[in-house]
Amino acid sequence: MAWGLSASFLVAIVTGILLAYPFNESYPLLSTVGIENVVPFGRFFRRLHYWSGFFTLILLFYHAAETLVAEGYRRRDWARWLALCATLPLLILIAFTGYVARGDETGRFAGYIAESLVLKVPLLGSLLNACLFLVRESGVHRPYLFHFYASLALFFVSGIWHFRLRRLPLEDLLGWLLAPMILALVYPLGLHAPGPYLLIKGPWFFLGVQEALRYFPPVWAGILFPALGILLYVLVKMDSLRKWVFGGLLVWTGVYMFFMVYGLLR
Amino acid sequence: MLAMFAALIQELRFKRADKVYTLASGRVDMCLACHKEAPGKAHARGVVGCADCHLGDPLTVEKKRAHRGMVKNPGDLRVADQTCGRPECHPGYAERVKKSLMATNRGIITTLRYYWGEIEDFHAEASVETLMKTDETSPALDYFRKLCGTCHLWLPKEKLPGFLKKKGGGCVACHLIPGKNKDKKVHSILTRKIPLENCVRCHNRSGRIGLSYQGLYEDEQYGAPIEEGEFAAEELEDGRFVARIPPDVHFKAGMVCVDCHTQNETMGDGKAYAHFEESLEITCEACHEGTGRTRKGTLLTNLKVKDGKIYWQAKLSGKELEVKRPDPVACRHPVHRRLTCESCHDQRVPQCFGCHVRRDPREKQLDKLSFKETPGLWEEFRSYMRVEVPTLGVREDKVVILVPG
């Protein structure tokens, strides 16, 4: 599955580079609609990009769970473990900024919510916002830059350091190219048009946070709640706390999944 | 290889747009890639998008997905909050119209039930919307459902057969006129200049105001009088025969219903009135005495006073019509102080005598609110019809005309 993760990520990166040509972050929705309806093979590559990104995220979650089961944290020193754990929020942010970059209603409002939440992070809020969002001031420019460059950086850094430049098996690459291709052929991807909606759902993986925001203050639901999941995952390495941390991680995952499914059904 | 081949086939079959279509506001509307229709100046193509009114998905040219969630008639009151009444277009109007008498028919329902002895409160709550959602019935309601239930704004356009097809439709019941090129499939035009026909489509029975105004008298039927072996009378869409009589002076001057009847009267002012006379604002004096305000204080912007003369700018033609001031002797005379204008100026009104209805429980009839055939066939009869000088009566200390019908 680790190779599947790399292969999916590679497909997402290659299709992303192709889509970057007709995409213009000054007119995000206009150019995304152009990709969907005007550019030859545009909608196919956009769907391929979406589904390969989807698989990348799902396989990363799987890989993270697999690491816990295989006790992979024992083989890493703290620095490496922290760096590997950081790929989890990093890839979520990459996927999230991809949603924001398309500029439709889902993306636009996801950007506004994320910007408001990030600004509530103590001390680092403004800096993080300047690096990731700043959507109210400069549209999707920053999210797009982050989405593009952070994807490339993560892929190459992890390729060099985590995979040690080993060649990706061709059968893995073809297999994980075929899966998003089939979905791209049969499952159309919509864009969310502007309108007088009373409910706009964010990206699927963000729905847990979006739903929690309905019931709890932004700092708790939008920052501490997702950060707790990452923190618990990091703390798994501590032998003295592992039993409690595992329990906490299971509870956290259950609660997040509950909020996410509830949000999906809303 | 197979997946790549499938992608190629899918791409070849996909009818791509030539460009990204945007509206004057910069918003994307890909509907314009296929649809070339234009719904008139006020909602000009390229200014208002197709999806702004008809919903659906304006961000794709894939027919199935683009048309998903679409509404054929955006004016339908069931969706008007999201279409005509959306916040950036006509906010608040849908709610006002839903409370108006043309939408609720509260006056008709309550009057029927009151005089048929079903309720004691002449101002009882009643609404077509509620009747459409429930099976609530009674003799008066059954009569309303079968004979009166076609003249209200909740009726979906083209739902009923024959001439009834043109009735209803919410906002478009009044605001839609046929497209100019009748040979081609063209978009109907949305207008604020409501033509007489749109009002008379419903307002042609009871007092026959829509007919009398334009000089038509619903005669004794059978096409009478017969002249040279032919029907001399004209036939209305619903099969009734009408004869020509002198029209109203306002009609002759080129005025239509909306010249006098204000937006607040027709579309509602946000209040739920029980009867027509409560919602009525316009008075003859508002124009003919040059006050320029209705009895509820609404300003009549088309009324102008120049060099001591009063002018009315006709809403459809735009022509300035000189408004005649009241006769200083006849109208101001103390003995006439209780007379309303119409008690002298309405020379003739249609009068329908001996009106009665019959219900045959053995037959079935279409319930126009549930669109189902239900037991009981209602038929209307009358003894005779006349057009003559109206009977005068007193209402709230004023002498008014009475129109039986």
Image (cartoon, rainbow, N blue to C red):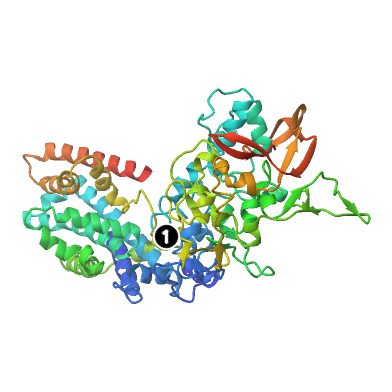
Q: Residue at x 19, y 44 (%)?
A: A221
| Amino acid type of the residue that numbered disc 1 sits on in the rendered structure | Leu
The quarter holding residue A176 reads: bottom left
Comparing B153 with A165, the one in front is: B153
Q: Position of residue A197 (x, y in %)?
A: 38, 52
| Tag 1 residue | A189
Q: Quadrant of the N terminus of chain A?
A: bottom left
Residue B234: x and y in percent read 80, 54
Residue B180, percent from left and from top: 63, 69
Residue B384 relative to residue B109: left or right: right
Residue B381 figure quarter: top right
Of residues A61 and B180, the one drawn nearer to the viewer in this rendering: B180
Q: Is residue B71 above or below residue B340?
A: below
Q: For residue B356, which quarter of the picture? A: top right
Quarter containing the C terminus of chain A:
top left
Tell me what residue is drawn at x 66 percent, y 61 percent.
B252
Residue B148 in the image: above or below residue A184 = above
Counting from the top left corner in percent of width and height, residue B187 is at 59, 65
- The chain identifier of the residue carrying mark 1 reads A
As drawn, A82 above or below B18 = above
Left or right of B351, for residue B273:
left
Residue B148 is at least partly visible in this image: yes
